[in-house]
């Protein structure tokens, strides 16, 4: 059975109608093939249950998972206030798992995933979407074994209210994690990169607690940024600056590399609300992004993913992009997808969305939590191996 995929996208006044139309369009594009797995990317402006009801009314019991995003992505570009449904058909198996307790404990959630995965002896990969505002993604990644090929992202939505959701099967909610376990005659290639570079400004992280970075060089973080960018410190606690701070993440020293860590928002007390902890007493560097660097990163991430496929032809690409890219590329929406298509070609179906963090398992090691990256996940059909 040849692996094929299709993507449908729709806008409507309510989520049920948008989900229904997107699923109908995807099924039409799939033709006579029977879908074995579905990914749903939905605008956070829709109600999750309505979207799920609309999609499942056509797809039925097909294994399905999804997440909320400020906008969806297809090979036609950016789609605000939309529902995107991607269908994959081939000689593979998928099952989904809904874990509502992710925001309470990433470690316990990882333990439940390990238990679920250990019930099967064949090699499998896990795609997941988790809450981007609540929960500890680093703790979750650290508790997973390196034996499970893991990739995914943190769902995004309204940065002001923290509204985001995840879907798995017929279940949905906030604060949860949706996982899909994929096995069979499929091969998956994953590539990642980012378009942010250090500009020479160095800070000492002098106070942090949990997800809150309190002070840089002994001053509230907002005061430090006020001195750099010229806006008063008090203005950083209010829109749009409270969210645009994500455009200027910190590069934290980790060996020879800089680990990118990005604010979700600036709090009223001037601290930065992160979604990963940053240790006190270490140095960090201001990072600045550019369109050219992001386009280069998108091409490199796609090349990495295709390289991992080897001689397998890509049938579908799932693209997870940090929400900072949407902010940076606002005047040129969708250019990251154009860069992906330069490498992938114009005929491979693409679906994706904007996330508050990304996860990959590079070179078979334990999963790594990223900020500010683009992750390109390509799916292809692997010939079955026969044993005597």
Image (tube, helix red, strand yellow):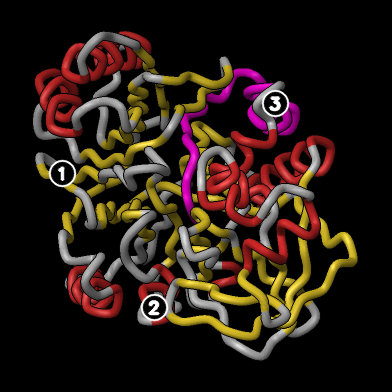
**Front one among 242 and 190:** 242
Helix, strand or loop for disc 1 = strand
Residue 88 position within the rendered picture, expressed as x and y whole percent measured from the top left: 35, 32
Closer to the chain start, of discs 1 and 2, is 2
Residue 167 painted magenta: no
Q: What's drawn in magenta, residue-wise? A: 332-358
Q: CA distance from mark 1 to mark 2?
A: 23 Å
Residue 204 shown left or right of residue 244 in the figure:
right
Q: Quadrant of residue 387?
A: bottom left
Residue 262 sits above or below residue 70 on the image? below
Closer to the chain start, of discs 1 and 3, is 1
| Residue at image point 45% right, 64% down | 275
| Residue at image point 25% right, 52% down | 178
Q: How many marks?
A: 3
- Mark seen at residue 172: 1
Residue farthest to the right?
200
**Front one among 268 and 70:** 268
Q: Quadrant of residue 179?
A: bottom left
Residue topped by disc 3: 335
| Residue at image point 52% right, 56% down | 266
- Mark seen at residue 139: 2
Q: CA distance from mark 1 to mark 3?
A: 31 Å
Residue 355 painted magenta: yes
- Mark seen at residue 88: none
| Residue at image point 63% right, 39% down | 325
**Front one among 133 and 182:** 133
């Amino acid at each position: 059975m040849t692996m094929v995929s299709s993507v449908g996208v729709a806008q409507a006044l309510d989520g049920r109608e948008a989900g229904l139309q997107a699923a109908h369009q995807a099924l039409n594009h799939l033709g006579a093939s029977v879908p074995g797995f579905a990914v749903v990317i939905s605008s956070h402006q829709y109600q999750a249950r309505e979207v799920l009801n609309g999609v499942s009314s056509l797809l039925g019991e097909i294994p399905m998972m999804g997440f909320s995003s400020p906008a969806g992505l297809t090979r036609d570009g950016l789609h605000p206030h939309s529902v995107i449904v991607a269908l994959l058909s081939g000689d593979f198996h998928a099952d989904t798992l809904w874990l509502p307790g992710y925001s309470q404990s990433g470690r316990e959630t990882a333990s439940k995933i390990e238990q679920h995965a250990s019930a099967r002896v064949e090699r499998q990969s896990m795609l997941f979407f988790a809450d981007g505002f609540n929960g500890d993604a680093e703790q979750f990644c650290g508790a997973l074994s390196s034996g499970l090929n893991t990739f995914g992202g943190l769902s995004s939505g309204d940065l002001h209210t923290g509204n985001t959701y995840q879907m798995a099967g017929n279940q949905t909610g906030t604060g949860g994690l949706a996982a899909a376990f994929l096995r069979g005659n499929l091969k998956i290639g994953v590539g990642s990169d980012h378009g942010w570079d250090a500009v020479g400004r160095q800070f000492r992280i002098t106070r942090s607690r949990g997800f809150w970075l309190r002070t840089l060089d002994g001053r509230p973080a907002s005061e430090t940024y006020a001195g750099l960018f010229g806006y008063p410190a008090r203005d950083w606690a209010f829109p749009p600056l409270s969210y645009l701070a994500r455009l200027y993440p910190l590069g934290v020293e980790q060996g020879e590399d800089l680990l990118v860590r990005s604010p979700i928002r600036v709090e009223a007390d001037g601290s930065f609300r992160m979604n990963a902890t940053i240790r006190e007493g270490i140095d960090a560097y201001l990072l600045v992004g550019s369109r050219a660097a992001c386009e280069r990163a998108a091409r490199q991430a796609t090349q990495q993913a295709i390289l991992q496929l080897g001689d397998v032809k890509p049938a579908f690409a799932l693209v997870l992009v940090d929400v900072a890219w949407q902010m940076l590329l606002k005047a040129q929406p969708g250019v990251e997808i154009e860069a992906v298509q330069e490498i992938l070609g114009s005929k491979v179906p693409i679906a994706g969305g904007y996330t508050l963090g990304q996860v990959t398992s590079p070179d078979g090691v334990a999963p790594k939590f990223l900020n500010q990256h683009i992750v390109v996940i390509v799916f292809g059909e692997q010939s079955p191996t026969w044993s005597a």
